[in-house]
Amino acid sequence: MELLTQLNQILTTDILKEGRNEESKIGHLFYLDYDVAKVLTFDAWKWRVKGVPKGAFLLAFYEGEPGEVEEALLLRVLSPTKLPTDDDITKSMIEYYKNNQDISGLAGTEKKSDLDPFTRFEFSVSGLECRILGVFYRNDSGSIEFGADVENFYSPNNYTVYKARGKVLEYIVNQGLGAFYGGEEKGLFKLGYVRYTSSRRFQDKEEKVNVWISSKDLLGKRTALFGMTRTGKSNTVKMLIKATKEISEKASLGELLEVEKKVENQELLDPFTLEGKPKFKVGQIIFDVNGEYANPNLQDEGTAIYDLYKEDVVRYSIVRKPGFKVMKVNFYREIENGFNLIKKHFLEEKENSGYMQSFLSVDLEKPDDYDEDYSVQTRYNRKVAAYLCCLFRAGFEPPKGFKVRFPGNKEINSLVRKEKPIDPSKGITLEEACIWFENAWNNYNEWDFFENYKNRKGKEYFDEDMQAILRVLTKKTKPGSKNLVNGYLKLRPLRELHTPASNRSFEQEILENLRRGKIVIIDLSQGNEEIQRLYSEKICETIFRDAMKRFTELKPNNFIQFYFEEAHNLFPKKEDKDLNQIYNRLAKEGAKLNIGMIYATQEVSSISSNILKNTQNWFIAHLNNEDEIREIRKFYDFADFSDSLLRFSPSSDKGFVRMKTYSNPFVVPIQIDKFTVKGEE
């Protein structure tokens, strides 16, 4: 049977009838309040239902008059609990042990024992403490609803407890999808199956219970994947990419840019159809720190995201290599983009020298009145030319035949090079421009022209911005000084971000591909941490600004999903309080812009609390220390799993996670399917 057809049947299951299966009965309540329930159970019943593992879902049904109350409490098993008779039982056991009597065996079995049937039965009784997750009840219209708390409870003797199994369990773990689900062609994807524990002797004998994820859970939401290396985080990310791709293919209107050419309609602002499908194809961008998404690798059995979706994947790399677009900036053509990278670099380096601080404060954005005011135009062109000379001296290769043009002065032109005056208004090479600026600055206090200009105009010929640039170009903080600073030499580490070939901004290309629903992979594996941060921030800011612009202009945004591997290397640290950083803005404002974030890391405690507090979907694998567990305990009901998250079997537990999605009010333990070409486990 088709999986989606099965899910359709499961979500229409009458859990208040199907859950009362005598073969799944495990006991009765003996204590009950609004948060905790305690269950009396027996070894034979636990054996019959193939075990009651920690974390298992139970249903406690009210057993009043038929039709009087139709409800079932949803419980999660936490731990054993002491019974009032336990002390007496323990004393009896010790006496039997002292007499070397055989008292083993489950009550109800044929194994011979020295115990009489009554005592043997008494020894098989035990208690379970459970968390109350909510209640399933039938409303006045006859439909079943779930409430994430308890409105009322009765004496515990009125309840019988059953283990949730089969389609009843599948209903429980997927019931949050009911509001989104509408049939077989909607935005749903099978992600894995329910798994309670590392040990699976009993679980492997039960039918696997599938867990699904909805497009409304995933798209435009913030999703965290936490776990140690080699616990299956990357596999989970790839499954989410695959799920998003399959959901994207069901988009009702196709590519956003194509639709916009044909229609202007306010209805396009709602990103989903009534059936829960996205209206436009979903763009996905993966910041691939280790190169495992762009390239085939052994852990994926020779497959990668690129291999699976070659027609829809565009790959970018920091270095030139076959099949990849180079991701560098032409600093000479893209003035503002290049200068922004320089400023980001020195911000990371915490540059504090005064002359460099002045240089980084220069405004290279073209003024609004550039075309109307000749004086503004003159000063701007001169400033840009001086900045480009700094790049040239620092070793940034210019495009072939590149020249600069700016108004000079006849007197200065003849002074900077007497044998052959340099006239910058006619277009000159960068070497000639360097000579012009360097000689002018070196003699700024000597040549009468500059003093006369200041007396006549009431201002300096070279304003503050120009002087800041010339200090870097000449390596002299004062005109004619013999003491040199590093100046343009400090720009040399940024040469690897530059290419003389490109005429179009790579981030604009990336943005267009995402608007068309492509998968963009940014291979950062051959860059150091600083370059990884520079490029990821630059791309994120470009996409965010475009989405915000479209939002304020009442234009639709298609969903764009960001994937960040090794997020602790990119995201602001926990103690960083700057909420204007791009990752914080994506976390806080991304939802209204249809921007989703999926981030993976081993270090929960290192992630900004601002990002954590805005995360809706959580996938938690093995964490190996109490500090990380303490962070996780702060969110939802992960405290119920704190002990088990510390345990891990490397041979069998990869992909075993505790999952909390936007639509589900409680955590579900799940084994994520293995990413393969066909998407089968």
Image (cartoon, rainbow, N blue to C red):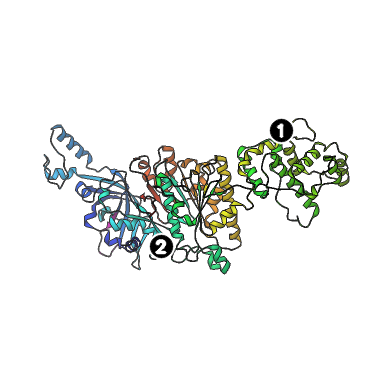
Residue 283 is situated, as x and y percent measured from the top left of the image, at 51, 56
Q: How far is mark 1 from mark 2, CA to CA?
A: 66 Å
- Residue 296 in sight: yes
Residue type at the position of mark 1: Val
Image side of residue 678 versus residue 119, left or right: right
Q: Does dot 1 land on a helix, a strand or a loop?
A: loop
Write down the residue under mark 2: 179
Of residues 568 and 245, which is closer to you in this image? 245
Dot placed on the residue nearer the N-terminal end, 1 or 2: 2
The span shown in magenta is 59-70
Q: Is residue 296 magenta?
A: no
Q: Can you identify the residue that label 1 sits on?
A: 485
Looking at the rendered structure, the secondary structure element under dot 2 is helix
Q: Is residue 448 left or right of residue 156?
A: right
Task: Tell me the residue at 70%/50% (across/down).
Answer: 365
State whether residue 577 appears in this view. no
6 lies above or below 38? below
Comparing 78 with 71, the one in front is: 78
Q: Nearer the viewer, mark 1 or mark 2?
A: 1
Q: Amino acid at mark 2?
A: Ala
Instruction: Specify the quadrant of the image occupied by residue 476.
Output: top right
**Residue 558 placement (x, y as % from top left):** 52, 60
Secondary structure, magenta segment, majority class: loop
